[in-house]
Image: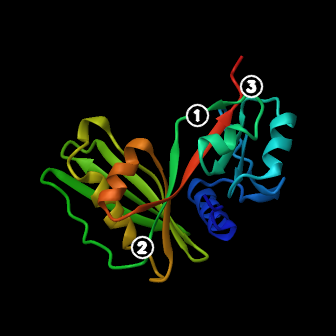
Amino acid sequence: MNNVDPDLLASWLTARSIARGLPLPVPDHGGLRVDTGLPEELCRHVFAGPDVGITELAHKITDPRIVIKMCGTREQLLVRVTPRWHLQPPGYLMTKEPGRNPVPSLPPGYWMQVATEAAVTTARIFAEDDTLAASGYAVEYEGVFVFDRIATDAAHQRQGLGAALMAALGTAQRSQAAQRVLVATEAGRALYATLGWRVLSPYCTVALPND
């Protein structure tokens, strides 16, 4: 498996940071570092593929709140870290070529709110009682249009809300040449595949145990 294009990864990671109000990524050990500063995650190191910098980091890091992420297979990542590192649930870097955006369509009983502030577009779907049923974010940056944190409440799943969110967020795309990018969970991968997305690479994560 070939490495993911480092420029594509950098653009996606930058857009993700913008969407979440985080510091922009900086080069570190041959990959990119984002200082997330969250209670459960101080920072993340992200690599476009197997790199010697992963092994160097794996020997240096002692804090379980610092994670290593890599585009590639779990086997490729595990051989580059020490046995004390544990695999986390799998993710998938997915892309969709530029093309026609579907028209957002909601099932009866729901309404949607879409707003753009600075570079971030937010879409929220509400049920009839005004409870939040689904939400997602999108950012366009240097040749990519990134979808982030697409989530549907368990009580409102399997009604097409995820597809409606994606379509609504897609209307914010300005450059029709921008490639669409997201990282999906195992469950999300199936949904996005039905919407024409393809897996560019597995996206694997390792972390130290919380002793």
Circle 1 sits on which residue?
Answer: 88
In depth, the one of 39 and 56 nearer the eye is: 56
Which callout, 3 or 2, points at the residue further toward the start of the chain?
3
Instruction: Locate residue 34, reporting x and y percent.
Output: 72, 51
Which residue is depicted at the point 49% across and 83% down? Answer: 177
Residue 84, labelled with which disc? Answer: 3
Figure check: 188 above or below 197: above
Characterize the local packing of mark 3: few (<14), some (14-19) or many (20 or more) Cα atoms within 10 angstroms.
few
Residue at 82 percent of width and 50 percent of height: 52
Quadrant of the image for the N terminus? bottom right
Q: Residues within 10 Å of mark 1 (few under 14, many from 20)?
A: some
Q: Amino acid at mark 1?
A: Gln
Q: Secondary structure at mark 3?
A: loop
Q: Quadrant of residue 2?
A: bottom right
Q: What amino acid is labelled 2 in the image?
A: Ala
Which of 88/202 is in front?
202
Question: Which of the labelled discs sits on residue 203, or is there none?
Answer: none
Q: Is residue 90 left or right of residue 162?
A: right
Give the residue type at disc 3: Arg
Please tell me which of labels 2 and 1 falls first in the chain. 1
Give the distance between the C-alpha atoms of the residues marked 2 and 1, in whole angstroms. Answer: 32 Å
